[in-house]
Amino acid sequence: MVDTSVVVIGGGTGTFPVISALKKQAVSLTSIIAVSDSGGSTGRIRDEFGFQPVGDLRQALAALAQADGEEWIRKILLYRFEKGNGLKGHNLGNLILTALQDMTGDTTRALEIAEKVFRLHGEVVPATSDNVQLEIHYKDGEVVVGEHTLDEDITTPRPIESVQLIPQATINPKAATAIQAAKLVVIGPGDYYASLLAALLPEGTKEAFQESKAKVVCMVNLMTRLTQTHDMTARQHVEGIETAIGRKVDYAVVNNGHIPETVLELYGAHHEFPVKDDLGEDASVIRADLISEELSKKTAVDTVHRSLLRHDVNKVRQVLSKLLQ
């Protein structure tokens, strides 16, 4: 089982519990991460240095930390400065990765070094080696550039027609090889447009999936996002992913666990609600209680919109371990 290759695809926050769950399995783990982030500490560093954004990559690295030293490695990679001229709001892990990018001139190489230094259980691969931005096409005809615009406060839904990467990008060869060799590919959870589709948009991704014999799993999001997926159902999530990869998914994993009323009220105040399960009765649909009892917290200087509710690591592990048998 040690030669079983597993790939996780998405962004940093959403895939964190999936990576954390899988790293304790006897698998070779690769995380393919979207690199179109343009907000918060990541956006500030990107504007100044011109490198690929590292925020989501850093979170994936933190999730791969091994038990021996895991707590402090995570603290180092996730630490955010709350004071200091020029440092306030920045993430230490982002600065470390940016320094490695500056020294090596290559994001993939920078990640390889970080994996060795921190003795991580697996590898993190940018979805593309190109330096890209996310271009959002709204149904009202407006076109906006920048993933950070999806974090802006709005009070009414604004349907998205499509998204694309600019400039046009190609899949990282290392990512393509990982998908082709995988036994299991897990897509999500995460921001539907900003993380999941952004990671699947590079040219060559469909071909990599079509050449792969992997079982493909779509982890359906717990909640909608007003700026991205208002009123989107579980079926729409899954069908959108299938269109992006050019094939059917083998399994869709959807939550059927109870969400506390207090949490629903917090989300409801922002017009965000549980994703409606309309997948029907099908052997490919896996329903389970996936809710983490611990709500996510963020520091006062973290300006990026983040989900309070997360998937539980142990519950995700129980589901995915059965698919690896």
Image (cartoon, grey):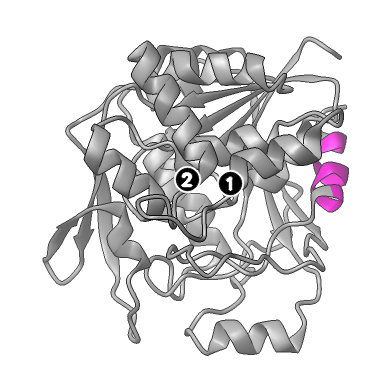
The residue lying at 63 percent from left, 69 percent from top is 308
Between marks 1 and 2 in the image, the one whose residue lies nearer the viewer: 1
7 vs 147, nearest the viewer: 147
Along the horizontal axis of the image, is 224 left or right of 54? right
Q: Please state the horizontal and vertical placement of residue 304, each as a whole percent of the image.
A: 44, 62
Mark 2, Cα crowd under 10 Å, few <14 / some 14-19 / many 20+, is many
Residue for badge 1: 188
Label whose residue precedes the other's in the sequence (1 or 2): 1
Secondary structure mostly taken by the magenta-highlighted segment of the chain? helix
Is label 1 in contact with label 2 (beta carbons under 8 Å)? yes
The residue lying at 74 percent from left, 88 percent from top is 261
User: Could you tell me the amino acid type at mark 1?
Assistant: Gly
Magenta-drawn stretch contains 316: yes
Tell me the quarter of the picture where residue 155 sits: bottom left
Q: Please state the horizontal and vertical placement of residue 259, each as a whole percent of the image.
A: 75, 77
> What SS does tag 1 mark?
loop
Along the horizontal axis of the image, is 112 left or right of 55? right
303 is higher (above) or lower (below) than 321: below
151 vs 106, nearest the viewer: 106
User: Could you tell me the amino acid type at mark 2?
Assistant: Ile
Along the horizontal axis of the image, is 177 left or right of 27? left
**Which stretch is magenta?**
314-322
Q: Please state the horizontal and vertical placement of residue 276, each as a whole percent of the image.
A: 60, 73
Along the horizontal axis of the image, is 175 left or right of 308? left
Residue for badge 2: 241
Is residue 321 visible to us here? Answer: yes
Magenta-drawn stretch contains 87: no
The residue lying at 21 percent from left, 65 percent from top is 138
Q: Please state the horizontal and vertical placement of residue 217, each as a whole percent of the image.
A: 65, 40
12 vs 140, nearest the viewer: 12
Is residue 248 visible to us here? Answer: no
